[in-house]
Image (cartoon, grey):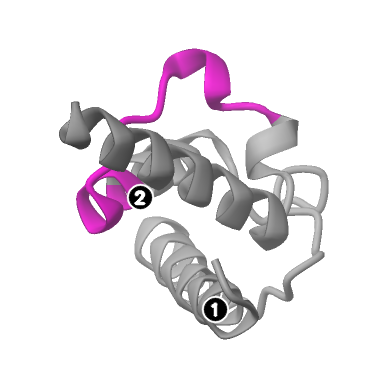
Amino acid sequence: MIENQVQGLRNALMRLVTQTIEETTGRHVSVGEEDPLIQGGFLDSLSMVNLVLALQVTYGIVIDLMEIDENNFGSIANLAALVERRTLSSTQEDML
């Protein structure tokens, strides 16, 4: 992805994460690209489930249970990398 697309994805993910947290918990939060989503207390278990569902629906990807960890959900930047990988892999599968 080129830099503008990466930044666009990160901005969209910030909105999606914020919206998911607000809808799930009623808390109004502001999340930056490198903020620790799990360790910082932004995502609780219910928010995490709702976020996984939102990511799958929004981006047409499948997130495996084993991918739901700090490495992939620890920050917006980590989420963007996950979405890029999953989007790329599903695009490659479609081409086969």
Was residue 50 drawn as part of the magenta stretch in this picture? no
Q: Regarding mark 2 in the picture, which secondary structure is present there?
A: helix
Which of the numbered marks, if any, corresponds to residue 28? 1
- Would you say 73 lies left or right of 11 here? right
For the residue labelled by badge 1, is the local secondary structure a helix, a strand or a loop? Answer: loop
Q: Position of residue 40 (x, y in %)?
A: 81, 53
Mark 2: amino acid? Leu
Q: Give me the residue at 54% from left, 14% from top.
A: 66
Task: Identify the amino acid type marked 1.
Answer: His
Q: Earlier in the sequence, mark 1 or mark 2?
A: 1
From the top left corner, tell me how far across and down residue 72 is, in percent. 65, 38
Quadrant housing residue 90 = top left
- The 10 Å Cα crowd at callout 1, few under 14, some 14 to 19, many 20 or more, is few
Q: Quadrant of the N terminus?
A: bottom right
User: Residue at label 2?
Assistant: 55
Magenta extent: 54-69
